[in-house]
Image (tube, rainbow, N blue to C red):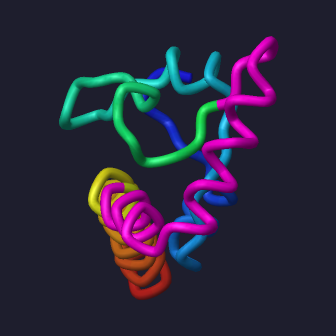
Amino acid sequence: YGTHLEYASAEIIATGVVPVFSKHWGDNTIHPEWGIKFSDVECAVFVEEDKFAESAELMIAIANDEELYEKYVTVATDFFNIFDERCLERVIFNTEAKINLDMG
């Protein structure tokens, strides 16, 4: 919740798979730069507890329509790209800090 995304979720997107998330999670997670709820963007299938059939229909539609699939993958890649950048910044920062400690 908040502005966070677990690495396991980011890996799904990196492999070119359209992610499937809980609608509740998507409604309660905000993009840290875009300022919008994840569920307001066609970047994943957001499943509601009482609408499993609709979610399944959307998954089948995405699987059978290359243009729709590409749309979801492209939007997801663009939308979640910030998390890759933030991860890289943390790795560089932590590595530099460790090198400074080891040399100091």
Picture coordinates of residue 7 (x, y %)? 62, 58
Locate residue 48 relative to residue 28 in the image: left or right.
right
Q: Quadrant of the N terminus?
A: top right
Whether the magenta-drawn stretch holds residue 9 is answered as no
* Front residue of 37 and 47: 47
User: Magenta segment, which residues?
Assistant: 47-75
Q: In the picture shown, does residue 89 fall above or below 102? A: above
Number of marks: 0
* Front residue of 55 and 47: 55
Q: Quadrant of the C terminus?
A: bottom left
Q: In the picture shown, does residue 100 fall above or below 4? A: below
Locate residue 1 relative to residue 67 in the image: left or right.
right
Picture residue at 66% right of the left edge, 51% below the top = 59
Picture residue at 29% right of the left edge, 34% below the top = 32
Q: In the picture shown, does residue 13 fall above or below 101? A: above
For the view shown, which residue lies furthest in the left direction?
34
Picture residue at 35% right of the left edge, 77% below the top = 96
Picture coordinates of residue 51 (x, y %)? 74, 19
Whether the magenta-drawn stretch holds residue 57 is answered as yes
